[in-house]
Amino acid sequence: VFHNKIEILPSHLLLCNKLRYLDLSNNDIRFIPPEIGVLQSLQYFSVSCNKIENIPDELFFCKKLQTVSENKLKQLNLNHEWTADKLRQKLQTNSNNRLELQLFMLSGLPDTIFEVTELQSLKLEIINNVTIPAAIVQLEDLQELSLYQCSLKIHSAATAFLKENLKVLRVKFDDGRELPQWMYVLRNLEELHLIGSLSSDASKNVTLDSLRELKALKSLTLKSNFTKIPQSIVDVASHLQRLCICNDGTKLENSSCKHLY
């Protein structure tokens, strides 16, 4: 049924309960009916190069479906739910006087984020197993990023963009997967805020690598529970204008504090 420019899924296809292969590529289909879930034998399903706005949850009732990417279909749903206009309605001015978008517990990152080009600050909370794509370079005004309990991968082009543009980074983490390794190369970063359990002992909990490359860092805030000042903090102490350690009641060894002076 591919390349016929059909706009509606033919209803007779839904009667083919033994259908295994369905290619609807290169048409003008906007809507997939929920009844598609009756095709329990379906193994291959393609809707590429259409105008699909919404994928029904019922499609995932097709337990034998293998070839189509479920993530791709869910991304379409996500983009449909979170239009650029809807995202713009959520913009607020944060304490740094930047236009901020906050997203909480989404199944992924809507591609439409990168259409909101006036965005200056992005806050993501409890969003896991997604990738920050190269499209982030479209957010030319983005200077602030907050990641609260997010495990994210990042495209190399996105790393290069953040390396040059990011001024403020906030990270709240429960384990090492939520502490981004690319933060150590953010040479223009001015503020770094870290919230989570850290240790100066590499064999325990989460440790900080050297912050030596953060040449522009002026302010470092740590809310943690270590007993010694990590060497990574000592590495940047000489050019910090502000250092704040909230140690959650854990006592710091006096000898470790001497290295800061």
Image (cartoon, rainbow, N blue to C red):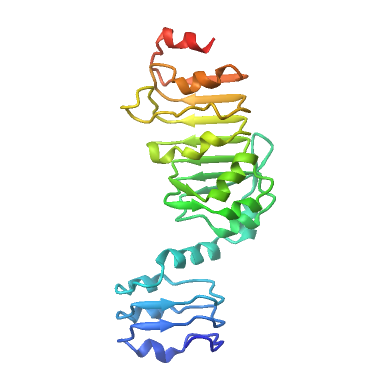
> Which residue shows up at 49% across the image and 25% down it?
222
Quadrant location of the C terminus in the rendered image: top right
Count up the numbered dots: 0
> Which residue shows up at 53% across the image and 49% down it?
156
Left or right: where 247 falls relative to 112: left
78 relative to 159, above or below: below
75 relative to 218, above or below: below
Which of the 4 image quadrants contains residue 21?
Answer: bottom left
Q: Residue furthest bottom?
A: 12
The image shows residue 15 at horizontal and vertical percentages of: 36, 90
Residue 119 can be seen, yes or no? yes
Residue 170 can be seen, yes or no? no
The image shows residue 105 at horizontal and vertical percentages of: 45, 50
> Which residue shows up at 53% across the image and 74% down it?
52
The image shows residue 148 at horizontal and vertical percentages of: 47, 40
Which of the 4 image quadrants contains residue 86?
Answer: bottom right
169 relative to 36, above or below: above
Which of the 4 image quadrants contains residue 255?
Answer: top left
The front one of 245 and 153 is 153
The front one of 182 and 206 is 182
The image shows residue 30 at horizontal and vertical percentages of: 54, 78
> Which residue shows up at 52% across the image and 34% down it?
184
